[in-house]
C-alpha cells in the first residue's frame, strides 16, 4: 500500500503540467522574463507564471477583486489602466487582446 502511494506521488510530481489555453502563447525559455509573470490571454484576473527551465507557463489566479498589472508584474487594483497594460501587451505581440473565441 505504501509503495503504491509513493509511486502515485512520484508520478504526480514528475508529470508535465498541461498549459492552459490562456498561457499557450508563451514559450518561457525565450521570453525576457524566464521566471516571471505575464498577462493571461483574454483574462485580466489570471496571469501566466513562467518557471526557470520549463517552456510552459502555469495559469495562476489573482486575489478576489484584483487583476494582473503587467508593468509591476503582480496582481493589483482592478482599474482601466491595469486592463490597458495587458491589452497593450498583446497588441505589441500582434495578438488580439480579447483571447480565444473573440
Image: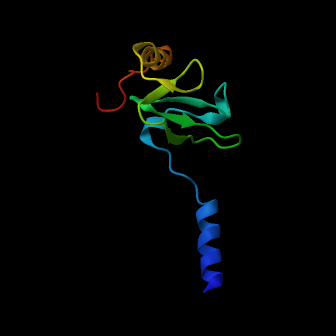
Quadrant of image for the C terminus? top left
Farthest residue to the left: give it: 102
Which x, y percent locates residue 52? 70, 40
Farthest residue to the bottom: give it: 1
Q: In this view, does 80 lie above or below 45?
A: above
Which x, y percent locates residue 8? 59, 73
Q: Residue at x 40, y 14 (%)?
A: 80
Q: Residue at x 45, y 13 (%)?
A: 81
Q: In this view, does 46 lie above or below 84?
A: below
Q: Is residue 17 visible?
A: yes
Q: Can residue 24 be seen in this view?
A: no
Colour basis: rainbow
Quadrant of the image occupied by residue 67: top left
Quadrant of the image occupied by residue 65: top left
Q: Residue at x 50, y 41 (%)?
A: 59
Residue 40 as seen in the image, left or right of residue 99 = right
Q: Residue at x 50, y 45 (%)?
A: 19
Quadrant of the image occupied by residue 58: top right
Quadrant of image for the N terminus? bottom right
Amino acid at each position: 500500500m505504501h509503495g503504491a502511494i509513493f509511486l502515485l506521488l512520484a508520478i504526480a510530481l514528475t508529470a508535465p503540467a498541461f498549459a492552459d489555453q490562456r498561457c499557450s502563447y508563451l514559450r518561457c525559455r525565450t521570453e525576457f522574463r524566464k521566471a516571471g509573470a505575464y498577462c493571461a490571454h483574454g483574462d485580466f484576473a489570471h496571469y501566466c507564471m513562467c518557471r526557470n527551465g520549463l517552456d510552459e507557463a502555469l495559469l495562476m489566479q489573482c486575489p478576489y477583486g484584483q487583476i494582473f498589472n503587467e508593468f509591476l508584474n503582480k496582481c493589483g487594483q482592478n482599474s482601466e489602466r491595469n486592463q490597458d497594460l495587458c491589452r497593450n501587451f498583446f497588441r505589441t505581440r500582434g495578438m488580439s487582446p480579447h483571447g480565444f473565441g473573440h
